[in-house]
């Protein structure tokens, strides 16, 4: 998977490659889909949600430019796979999920697998997570119609926010906080489940 789907498509950050080699993706998919765990596709994880395509996880992680002493905020825990990949690179990952059952199942998984630097919280990630802000990077794995202002507010200077924006035609964007303001760079077209504004 890493060689053919990640490196072959241009992901070159060695920290991202090493992290994706270490994290067992088959542990994050439903049991009946284990045979497809390393396929080049997103997979359903229940409640109408998905675990992202491996390449998209690699790309978003690379765009974030993570470092070993970073504290990162993820919005949309889902299976917990993206958190697990990040946890291999950075100091701490906070991940916010709106669906309680999904958050609980991801939490169980990361405990079983021994990822001690991930904290999963139930909440509406649209408003970020003020408690531990500002962050060295924020990654949103559900699509918003526009960039949530609270997430920009919770970035440190120099930090990136990686987020898919749009309805049917979505694009991945990288927002960077600089001394002069916010810089915005487009990446590829993507398709994510929507960022929904309330918890269940
Ligand atoms: N990163 C995940 C994929 C996430 S799918 C992985 O690696 O598997 C998107 C997730 O975002 C879903 O679980 C969905 O419930 C969650 N989500 C949607 N809107 C949200 C919101 N406002 N706050 C927090 N989580 C949200």
Image (cartoon, helix red, strand yellow):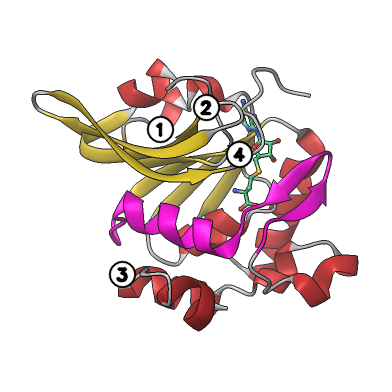
Give the Cα distance between marks 4 and 2. 16 Å
As drawn, the label of residue 132 is 1
What's the magenta region? 41-70
Which residue matches tag 2?
Answer: 166
Which circle, 4 or 2, is nearer the viewer?
Answer: 2
Q: Residues within 10 Å of mark 2 (few under 14, many from 20)?
A: some
Quarter occupied by the C terminus? top right
Q: Residue 161: x, y in percent?
A: 35, 37
Residue 94 seen anywhere in this rendered image of the structure: yes
Q: Residue 43: x, y in percent?
A: 74, 57
Q: Are marks 2 and 1 in contact (CB under 8 Å)?
A: no
Which residue matches tag 4?
Answer: 76
Label located before the other in sequence (4 or 3): 3
Residue 159 or residue 55, whichever sits in front? 55
Label located before the other in sequence (4 or 1): 4
Classify residue 198 as left or right of residue 2: right
Q: Residues within 10 Å of mark 1 (few under 14, many from 20)?
A: few
Which circle, 2 or 1, is nearer the viewer?
Answer: 2
Classify residue 197 as left or right of residue 162: right
Q: Residues within 10 Å of mark 3 (few under 14, many from 20)?
A: some
């Amino acid at each position: 998977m890493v060689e053919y789907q990640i490196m072959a498509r241009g992901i070159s950050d060695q920290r991202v490659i090493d992290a994706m080699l270490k994290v067992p993706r088959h542990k994050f998919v439903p049991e009946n889909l284990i045979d497809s765990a390393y396929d080049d596709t997103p997979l359903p994880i229940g409640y109408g949600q998905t675990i992202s395509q491996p390449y998209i996880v690699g790309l978003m992680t690379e765009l974030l430019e993570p470092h070993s002493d970073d504290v990162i905020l993820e919005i949309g825990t889902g299976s917990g796979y993206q958190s697990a990949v990040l946890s291999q690179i950075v100091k701490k990952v906070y991940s916010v999920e709106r669906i309680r059952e999904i958050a609980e199942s991801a939490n169980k998984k990361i405990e079983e697998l021994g990822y001690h630097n991930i904290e999963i919280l139930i909440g509406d990630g649209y408003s970020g997570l003020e408690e531990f802000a500002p962050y060295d990077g924020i990654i949103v794995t559900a699509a918003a119609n526009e960039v949530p202002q609270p997430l920009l507010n919770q970035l440190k200077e120099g930090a990136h926010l990686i987020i898919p924006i749009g309805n049917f035609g979505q694009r991945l964007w990288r927002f960077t906080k600089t001394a002069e303001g916010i810089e915005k760079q487009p990446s590829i077209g993507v398709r994510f489940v929507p960022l929904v504004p309330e918890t269940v």
